[in-house]
Image (cartoon, grey):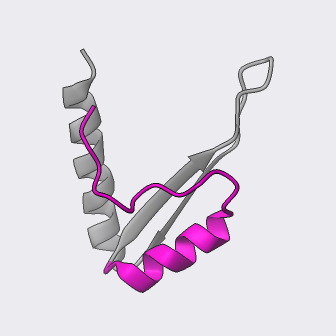
Amino acid sequence: MRKLEKGLFWPQGKSTVEIRKALSENSTCYVLITCTEATQDGKMEVEMTYGGDPILAAYLVESAQNIIDTDIP
């Protein structure tokens, strides 16, 4: 797993609203993907929000997918 820069982790209990506010104040563009724990039948709620230029947000998602694909054996 790749190391993330200091300050990219938030303590548990912070709301996504607080996280989005912090990201929008400190970033040109961001993508935030969150999910709930899976239920017994395997379902979970997934939410994605982004701020900034939608083309740059799409690039961030694509780049992140490439990193994840590389890290998965």
Q: Position of residue 5 (x, y in %)?
A: 28, 56
Q: Is residue 35 left or right of residue 54?
A: right
Q: Quarter of the image holding residue 57?
A: bottom left
> Residue lying furthest top in this view?
73
Tell me if 28 is positioned left or right of 40 in this view.
Answer: left
Residue 14 falls inside the magenta stretch: yes
Which residue shows up at 34% across the image and 75% down it? Answer: 29
Q: Is residue 25 magenta?
A: yes
- Nearer-the-camera pick, 67 or 2: 2
Residue nearer the viewer, 25 or 59? 25
Say above or below: 65 vs 18: above
- Up/down of 60 relative to 3, above or below: below
Q: Residue at (47%, 68%) from the top-left corner? A: 50
Q: Position of residue 15 (x, y in %)?
A: 68, 63
Q: Residue at x 59, y 55 (%)?
A: 11
Counting every numbered tag in the picture gives 0
Q: Main secondary structure of the magenta part?
A: loop
Residue at x 28%, y 34% (from the top left corner): 68
State the image quarter where residue 70 is shown.
Answer: top left
Left/right of residue 46 with respect to residue 22 in the rendered view: right
Which quadrant would residue 72 be assigned to in this image?
top left
Residue 20's x, y, as percent? 54, 72
Q: Which residues are magenta?
A: 1-28
Q: Quadrant of the C terminus?
A: top left
Residue most toward the right?
A: 40
User: 20 above or below 33?
Assistant: below
In the image, 67 versus 5, the foreground residue is: 5
The quadrant of the picture occupied by the N terminus is top left
